[in-house]
Image (tube, rainbow, N blue to C red):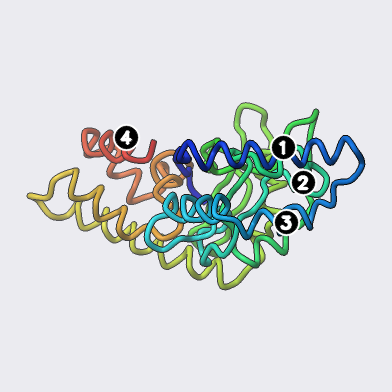
């Protein structure tokens, strides 16, 4: 998982979404809203096709799922599920790109605490502040919060909901990406003449799973060779860190 920058929609598309949401809200107040039917009707129109295209653009050429970053994102996902929360059905900040597996696991499940989501929204926050990565197993797990002396509650719920620590194929992909990133940093440390910008570009090209966030923002910064880069090449480290934010 990685932080995803949400792009703005064209004004016409945004206006059409607002109109559809207003219509859905009116039907809900009248007791006439059929959520799935309303969504399927809207999903076939040009505004939602434009939304899907923008979501795919946000994920780059591989168009990966915003939750697992391992599988192809196939369709629009509602962060706040549309069935229990139809008032968010056509709101742009609530729409993500999701693969079939993550969509199946999440479904309409949406844990809350004091009214706030306990699932990480990768378009609104840095996932690696709540998540951690185990290079040995390849599993994504909850991050331990030293300030509270406990595991991140949001990290725990996200891992549990999406089964990020129980998907073998997912773990294998994360391990491969980790090995590529570690090899690039080791090569940079052992060879002279390479620029910090070239390292950033190489890391970006090799990172299929958003692990540069773990390496430079998360707990990976304390694991060699990333720790070695931070200690021996502080200027390069600062360049890499800035690229992750």
* Mark-to-mark CA distance, 2 and 3: 8 Å
Q: Which residue is mark 3?
A: 106
Q: Residues within 10 Å of mark 4 (few under 14, many from 20)?
A: few
- Evaluate if marks 4 and 1 touch, with contact meaning CB atoms under 8 Å apart: no
| Residue at the disc numbered 4 | 242
Q: Residue 19's x, y, as percent?
A: 65, 38
- Of circles 2 and 4, which is in front? 2
Residue 119 falls in which quadrant of the image?
Answer: top right
Mark 2, Cα crowd under 10 Å, few <14 / some 14-19 / many 20+, is: some
Q: Residue 117: x percent and y percent?
A: 72, 37
Marks 3 and 1 close (CB-CB < 8 Å): no
Task: Relative to 30, say whether 166 is above or below.
Answer: below
**In screen coordinates, is 49 left or right of 176?**
right
Mark 3 crowdedness (10 Å alpha carbons): few <14, some 14-19, many ≥20? some
The answer to the question of whether label 2 and label 4 lie on touching residues, with beta carbons closer than 8 A, is no
Q: Earlier in the sequence, mark 4 or mark 3?
A: 3
Left or right: where does residue 189 sit relative to residue 54?
left
Which residue is depicted at the point 70% across and 57% down? Answer: 41
* Nearer the camera: disc 4 or disc 1: 1
- Compute the Cα span from label 2 to label 4: 32 Å
Q: How far apart in space, not on screen, are marks 4 and 3 (Cα)?
A: 32 Å
Q: Are marks 2 and 1 in contact (CB under 8 Å)?
A: yes
Disc on res. 117? 1
Instruction: Give the labeled residue for mark 2.
Output: 110
Element class at badge 3: helix
For marks 4 and 1, give the CA distance.
Answer: 28 Å
The quarter holding residue 152 reads top right
């Amino acid at each position: 998982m990685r932080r995803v920058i949400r792009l703005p929609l064209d004004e016409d598309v945004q206006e059409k979404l607002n109109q559809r949401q207003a219509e859905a809200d009116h039907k809900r107040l009248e007791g006439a809203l059929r959520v799935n039917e309303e969504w399927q009707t809207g999903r076939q129109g040009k505004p939602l096709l434009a939304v899907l295209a923008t979501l795919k653009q946000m994920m780059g050429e591989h168009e990966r799922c915003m939750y697992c970053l391992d599988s192809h994102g196939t369709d629009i996902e509602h962060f706040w599920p549309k069935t229990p929360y139809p008032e968010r059905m056509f709101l742009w900040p609530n729409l993500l790109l999701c693969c079939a597996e993550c969509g199946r696991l999440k479904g309409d499940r949406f844990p809350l605490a004091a009214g706030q989501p306990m699932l990480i929204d990768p378009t609104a926050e840095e996932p690696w502040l709540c998540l951690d990565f185990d290079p040995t197993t390849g599993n994504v797990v909850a991050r331990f919060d030293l300030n509270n002396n406990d595991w991140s509650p949001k990290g725990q719920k996200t891992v549990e909901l999406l089964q990020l620590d129980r998907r073998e194929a997912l773990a294998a992909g994360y391990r491969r990406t980790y090995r590529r990133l570690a090899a690039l940093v080791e090569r940079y440390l052992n060879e002279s003449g390479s620029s910090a910008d070239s390292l950033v570009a190489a890391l970006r090209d090799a990172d299929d799973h958003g692990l540069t966030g773990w390496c430079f923002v998360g707990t990976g910064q304390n694991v060699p060779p990333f720790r070695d880069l931070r200690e021996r090449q502080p200027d390069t480290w600062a360049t890499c860190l800035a690229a992750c934010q």
